[in-house]
Amino acid sequence: MSPRRARRRDDSRPLGFPTGTDKVEEWPDGDWKVRMLTGASSTKTYRCPGCDQEILGGRPHLVAWPDWPGGDEERRHWHPTCWRKRLDRGPGRSRY
């Protein structure tokens, strides 16, 4: 098999989601600004509020915050899967 065929596709980024730009997503819990970050742009370690696991520096992830005045102070770093599934959690789920 040629090296070209053996390469793995990078599926870590959702399709149609431009990196480094904010987009507003409408959810049942309100409108949220969301920004996808590449691994190269993130150097710190964060804790995902969805799964309570660390997001290591250099790993692609997203930042989300409420789309209302003052919502910037509630920015949180999420694993993309945790963000998409956050409303599926039962009682005691995180507010974010």
Image: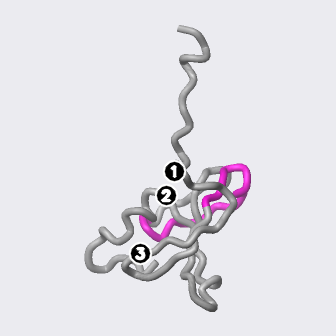
Whether residues under marks 2 and 1 lie with C-beta atoms below 8 angstroms apart, the answer is yes
Left or right of 51 in this view: 70? right
Depth order, front residue of 95/37: 37
Q: Amino acid at mark 3?
A: Trp
**Residue 9 in which image quadrant:** top right
Residue at which label 3 appears? 27
Secondary structure under tag 3 reads strand
94 relative to 85, above or below: below
Task: Please name the residue shown 45% across and 75% down the image.
Answer: 26
The stretch of residues the image draws in magenta is 36-51
In three-dimensional space, the C-alpha distance between marks 3 and 1, rounded to whole angstroms, equals 17 Å
Question: Residue at the left extreme?
Answer: 90
- Mark 1 sits on what residue? 14
Local SS, label 1: loop
Residue at numbered disc 2:
80
Q: Nearer the viewer, residue 12 or 32?
A: 32
Sequence-wise, the earlier of marks 2 and 1 is 1
Label 3 crowding class (10 Å Cα cut-off): few <14, some 14-19, many 20+? few
Crowding at dot 1, Cα within 10 Å, few <14 / some 14-19 / many 20+, comes out as few
Residue 25 lies within the magenta run: no
Query: What residue is at 41 percent from the left and 75 percent from the top?
Result: 27
